[in-house]
Amino acid sequence: MTQSAPSSSDTRPPRRPGPPDSPWAAGGTMFAGVLLFVDGVLDVFKGIAGIASDDVYARISNYTFKFDVTAWGWIHLALGILLMIVGLGILRGAGWARFVGVVLAALNIVANFIWLPYQPVWAIVSIAIDTFVIWALCTARTRPVV
């Protein structure tokens, strides 16, 4: 039996080589969406606490990346809202949300690294969440629609 070459009317995009998507990859993407949303909620809480009262967080005397706590509150509030929106986009399957999710998670890692002396435990938790989110969104592949 011979195989014929694909016809020129075949408009399907070529499949990437490698194993087909697994339920683990799809579950990882959904979990990344949930984690991104939860990380956004945590950032909103950090932001509200920083905006509402400068006494909530420890004062740092000699830190290279020293900012006013209220400014940090606004940064975390804005990042948190964006993370929540993108997390919902990932859960809804929006194509743009995976790329934006990776970018925002990377920005959030940097922000939480700089935020580390103010709240070390929560900063490390957020960094760990964002690291998993980046891994999950970068490794999961979607199947082309046929």
Image (spheres, helix red, strand yellow):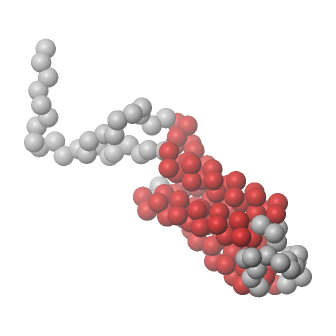
Tell me what residue is drawn at x 59 percent, y 67 percent: 107
Q: Quick one: quadrant of the N terminus?
A: top left
Task: Indicate the quadrant where residue 19 lies.
Answer: top left
In the displayed structure image, the side of residue 49 where residue 72 appears, left or right: left
Q: Quick one: quadrant of the C terminus?
A: top left
The mark total stands at 0
Residue 39 lies, in percent from the top left, at: 68, 62
Q: Nearer the viewer, residue 96 or 145?
A: 96
In this rendering, the answer to whether 29 lies above or below 17 is below
Q: Nearer the viewer, residue 124 or 86?
A: 124
Tell me what residue is drawn at x 16 percent, y 42 percent: 10
Residue 131 lies, in percent from the top left, at: 63, 53
Tell me what residue is drawn at x 85 percent, y 84 percent: 54
Residue 77 lies, in percent from the top left, at: 68, 77
Residue 58 lies, in percent from the top left, at: 88, 75
Q: Is residue 35 visible?
A: no
- Which residue is farthest top? 1
In the displayed structure image, the side of residue 19 where residue 122 appears, left or right: right
In this rendering, the answer to whether 123 lies above or below 7 is below
Tell me what residue is drawn at x 34 percent, y 35 percent: 17
In the displayed structure image, the side of residue 66 where residue 110 appears, left or right: left
Q: Is residue 113 visible?
A: yes
In this rendering, the answer to whether 134 lies above or below 89 is above
